[in-house]
Image: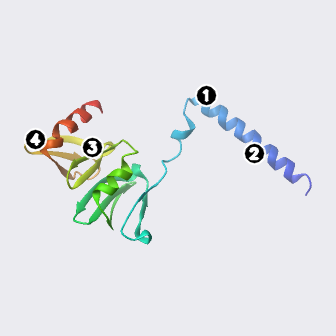
Amino acid sequence: MVGIIPVTISYIVTYNKIYRNALREAAIPPENLFREDEINLCAGNPKNDLRVNPGDIVYLCSNDNYVTVVTMKGDAQSKTTIRGTLKAAESELSRSGRFFRCHKCYIINLNFAGTVKGHNQNMTIRLLPSGQEIPVSRSRADALQKIIKKI
């Protein structure tokens, strides 16, 4: 029993050194291996708050005081509705930098953005996993086109 603790500690230290060397050789920053921290989308009641990984969010849709959050896990798409405003969700998602409010009722994840159809008067953006078409407001059409060109 006395020898198990030092052997275990030695094994863990050796394993960590080998792991760090492998990461350095592969040139992968360690922070890119792990998923992003989950964010908390506030609902009216703290018990109903939604904790979600920003990378899983496809888009958010507003309907009065309710926000529908559409997420993608693998091939399955799920919808969750919480009580709150899109403005509050937008402020929470602004840290990520990959979300764009394309319409007064929609925020999209630019990682799922596909093709843009139409012109400034009647523009829609097709999201990749589901083929869902999201309207783009005239005031935000130019900004969206500039962002899509950068991607």
What residue is shown at x 21% (from left), y 53% (from top)?
132
Kindly identify which residue carries mark 1. 25
What residue is shown at x 18% (from left), y 51% (from top)?
133
Would you say 121 lies left or right of 35 here?
Answer: left
Return the x and y of residue 43 as percentages of the image width and height: 37, 66
Place residue 95 in its image quadrant.
top left
Query: Decide: marks 4, 2 in contact (CB < 8 A)?
Result: no
Kindly identify which residue carries mark 2. 12
Q: Amino acid at mark 2?
A: Ile
Q: Disc 1 versus disc 3: distance between alpha carbons?
A: 33 Å
Kindly identify which residue carries mark 3. 113
Q: Amino acid at mark 3?
A: Ala
Name which of mark 3 and mark 2 comes first in the sequence.
2
Name which of mark 3 and mark 4 comes first in the sequence.
3
At mark 3, the secondary structure is: strand
Name which of mark 2 and mark 1 comes first in the sequence.
2
Would you say 138 lies left or right of 5 here?
Answer: left
Q: Residues within 10 Å of mark 1 (few under 14, many from 20)?
A: few
At mark 4, the secondary structure is: loop
Mark 1 vs mark 3: give the one in front.
Answer: 3
Kindly identify which residue carries mark 4. 118
Q: Amino acid at mark 4?
A: Gly
Return the x and y of residue 81 as percentages of the image width and height: 31, 66
Query: Decide: marks 3, 4 in contact (CB < 8 A)?
Result: no
Pick the front one: 88 or 150: 88
What residue is shown at x 71% (from left), y 36% (from top)?
17
Name which of mark 4 and mark 1 comes first in the sequence.
1
